[in-house]
Amino acid sequence: MMDEAPADGVSQTLGPNDWKGALGQTWAANLQALEAQWAATRPLGLATLAPQPGERILDIGCGGARTTRAIGEAVAADGSVLGLDISSELVGVANQGLRDLPQASAILADAALYGFDGGAWDAVFSRFGVMFFEEPVAAFRNIRSALKRGGRAVFVVHADRKLSPWASLPAQIAAEVLGPPEPTPPGAAGPFGWESPEIFAPILEDAGFADIAWDTHPIEGPMGSGLDPDPVTAALLMVRNIGVVARRLSMIEDEGARIATWDAIAEKLGPALAPLVRDGAVWIGGCVHVITARA
């Protein structure tokens, strides 16, 4: 395990209770923009998963279920896909989008605790849904129990924060205004909880998974729709609503101070984002691991 807490201003603590509350609501409200930002990761994950007709597949942290739907279309009428999420708002959006696909559904459930019908599933998939368990080894033992012997697992997670300017750039500028956040230990629940193989490989091994491997991919995505008259303002709104800056601002109780702090951050961040405008949006980079394992 790494032995130093991050010093770049990125706080990564974010657990399941956050998703059950305001964060899930905010994510659902911004789902279209967020899906666009991470669109490049869906084909990466699906190509690795390679779902086949007739298979039964779990989708952990399914969110708005666009990937769940793609899996459902691939497994066809003889297969099934079940999405799980702990945000009631996101599950509601998911089932709206799956209502015409009988082999696909989503339920409000915590995959760490859910009573799976043991050994009945061919594969488990997750795109950005596995980094938030507070007791990850126990959670993945439960998830592994759902799989058939030799069943496959595919997880897409955020990689090294230093290669992820979508998070590190706003966080660094927020730290210039607010000072550095309280340090968090490597592996703490949050978006970068699985940024290193030194973190996730032992968790999966201790949970009983085998043949653990991963590929690392640089990605890029738009912070905005591509149709915004002012792409920088659209990107700033995303930063203000979701992510480390939003979490730090939420800790400021006085509304006037919160607004003034955001104005100071935006004044610095806007010019940093402006050179990244292309095709009507701010395009910003990231990096992901695509992890594979066997039950």
Image (cartoon, rainbow, N blue to C red):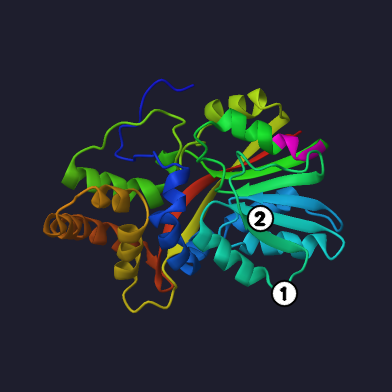
First of labels 2, 1 by sequence position = 2
Structural crowding at the residue carrying mark 2, measured as other residues with C-alpha within 10 Å and reported as few (<14), some (14–19) or many (≥20): many
Q: Is residue 20 visible?
A: yes
Callout 2 amino acid: Gly
- Relative to 157, 118 lies left or right: right
Which residues fall within the magenta stretch? Answer: 144-148
Residue 152, quarter of the rendered image: top right
Q: Residue 13 in the image: x percent, y percent?
A: 39, 38
Q: In the rendered image of this protein, does residue 14 appear above or below residue 204?
A: below
Q: Residue 23 in the image: x percent, y percent?
A: 41, 55
Give whichever of 254, 265 is nearer the camera. Answer: 254
Q: Secondary structure at mark 1?
A: loop
Q: Residue 77 in the image: x percent, y percent?
A: 84, 66
Location of the C terminus by quadrant is top right
Residue for point 27% across, 44% down: 172
Queried whether the magenta region covers residue 146, the answer comes back as: yes
Q: In the rendered image of this protein, does residue 104 appear above or below residue 45?
A: below
Residue for point 48% across, 36% down: 193
Callout 1 amino acid: Asp
What is the CA distance from the residue labelled 2 to the residue labelled 1?
Answer: 15 Å
Give whichever of 178, 268 is nearer the camera. Answer: 178
Residue where numbered disc 1 is placed: 100
Q: Which mark is residue 227?
A: none
Residue for point 62% across, 64% down: 66
- Counting the numbered discs, the total is 2
Residue where numbered disc 2 is placed: 83
- Relative to 124, 94 lies left or right: left
Q: Is residue 30 visible?
A: no
Structural crowding at the residue carrying mark 1, measured as other residues with C-alpha within 10 Å and reported as few (<14), some (14–19) or many (≥20): few
Give whichever of 207, 155 is nearer the camera. Answer: 207
